[in-house]
Structures are given as structure tokens and as C-alpha cells.
Amino acid sequence: MDLGLRNKVVVVTGASRGIGFATSRVFGQEGARVVMAARTAETLERSAETIRRETGCTVHTMACELTREDESARLVAFAEETHGRIDVLVNNASGKLPVGEFATLTSQAWLTAWINKLQIYVTLARQVFPIMQRQNGGRIINVIGAHAARNPAPSYLPIGVISAGLINFVKGLADLGAKHRILVTGVSPAGVDTGERWQSWLARRAASEGKTIEEVAAEKSEYSLGRPAKPEEIADVICFLGSARASYISGIVVTVDGNVTRGVWL
């Protein structure tokens, strides 16, 4: 299947590892021109070089702190000035998100959750929107956690509230973008084995439940497929949503969680 992505310009945030890296690589495999953004220049460039070597595609990088609006504007300007357009934005970056018991979470913790994820996504979408309007088309794809948004957990309330808000944002922005052929979607994974971040999540969960990391890792009851997702399994869905084959998909969030979410949507 030809996804129609050759020479399309794709901006991926949080791109140095995990879902962001896997997404950048799969777009590269399809012949897209990829702009990868993350905080740490050295790690980012190393990841980009891997993709260049494997795919032969054009990859540019920009190290930036996306919680700052001037930094996200710099990223968007760089992508447009370098390639003349932006066809796909993949919102994947987030800062450290607070977890803990509700009674102990401060107002600052809630504000941090807002700034470190929702504000990043909204700001970047707002900055690419006029570019896509001028082009009469584009895709905005938001990575939103399924666990937090649709399976609320007491120790993850800030993350859940932000994620649920982003689901609403997808639908509202899709309405605004429709007349300009700007398609807005979300991809909602549950647990994803992203290496260091996965180990960090296991450690936080073990601490909150009074268990060892090994005990938590051994518990697979919540994964009916017996394991968390691989980053590539999320990236493939993101790539499809950014492609010509998904030209009538907008305003929805695709859950990619291996049957973890308990519920149905009709």
C-alpha cells in the first residue's frame, strides 16, 4: 500500500526516543522529510543519524524546550523555512508529569501538568494551524495516554484530567480545521515499553502499591495480550493517520492499547 507520504514534511516532537523516535523512523521509511524535536541535542542527533542511515530520508533536528512558546515558534518557523510547508504535526512531547495522592498534590503540581503537556500540544497546534490553512490541508496528530484518560487512577489524576482535555481538544480542533482540510486525530496507547521511561513508570507504580519493581513487571493481568505495546506498534498507527490513506478520518482518538481499556464506544 502506497501511503502517499513521499516528500511530505512531518514534524515530530519528543522524537529522540520511544514513540517519537519510532514515529520519526516509520515516516522516514515512507520517504517523508522529517523534522525531529526534543530537549537534548546529543541524543536527538544520534537518533536522527540512525534514521538517516536506515532509510536514506531527509532528517533535520532541533533541540528545544517546548514548554516555552518562543521555542515552539522557533521549531515551527524552522520547519517551514527549511521545507516551505508543514504537512503533519505529531504532538508527542511532554515534560515530567506529577503523580501522587490527591490530598498531597499542590496547585503547582496541577499547573505543571497543564504546562508540561496540554499547553505544549495546544501551542504547537495553534502555531501550525495558519500554515496548514494557507496550504489548504494538513494533519495534526496528538499522542494521548489511554490509561490516564479513560481508566482513571487515583494517583494519576492530573495526567488523566489533561489527557481527557486533549481528547476534547481533538474534536473541537477537527471542527475548526474541516473547511481547510486540516484533519485532527489522536492516538491513545496504554502501557508502552519505551525503555527507561517504562522502567520509571514501573518504579512509580511499585512505590505507590508497596511492591517491588519485579512484582509489578510480572503482573500481566491488565494486558490481555500478555505484554505492553512496542513503540513501533503505536508509530504505525500514527503514520497511517498522517497518510493519504486516512483522508476521511478526523475528530477521533484511536485507542491502541491491546484491549486494556474497559469500555465500548458506539
Image (cartoon, rainbow, N blue to C red):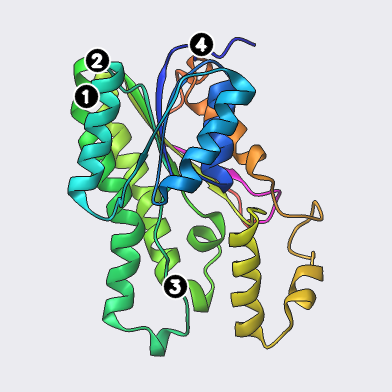
Q: Amino acid at mark 2?
A: Gln
Mark with earlier residue (2, 3): 2
Q: Amino acid at mark 1?
A: Ile
Q: Which mark is residue 131?
A: 1
Q: Which quarter of the figure has residue 22?
A: top right
Residues 159 and 34: in front is 34
Instruction: Give me the residue at 57% from left, 29% from top.
Output: 51
Q: Amino acid at mark 4?
A: Gly
Helix, strand or loop at mark 1: helix
Q: Amino acid at mark 3?
A: Leu
Judging by the rendered image, the residue that carries numbered circle 2 is 135
Query: Is the residue 157 above or below the residue 18 in the image?
Result: below
Residues 176 and 26: in front is 26
Judging by the rendered image, the residue that carries numbered circle 4 is 4
Mark with earlier residue (1, 4): 4
Q: Are marks 4 and 3 in contact (CB under 8 Å)?
A: no
Residues 71 and 3: in front is 71
Question: Residue 262: percent from the left, percent from the top?
Answer: 64, 58
Real-space CA distance between mark 2 and mark 3, rounded to the nearest whole angstrom: 38 Å
Mark with earlier residue (4, 2): 4
Real-space CA distance between mark 4 and mark 3, rounded to the nearest whole angstrom: 39 Å
Q: Over which residues does the magenta segment extend?
A: 252-260
Instruction: Give me the residue at 49% from left, 20% from top.
Output: 243
Mark with earlier residue (1, 3): 1
Sort mark 3 into few (<14), some (14-19) or many (20+) by Cα contacts within 10 Å. Answer: many
Question: Residue 251: percent from the left, percent from the top?
Answer: 39, 35
Real-space CA distance between mark 1 and mark 3, rounded to the nearest whole angstrom: 35 Å
Q: Which mark is residue 157?
A: 3
Residue 98 horizontal side relative to residue 209, left or right: left
Residue 23 horizontal side relative to residue 13, left or right: right
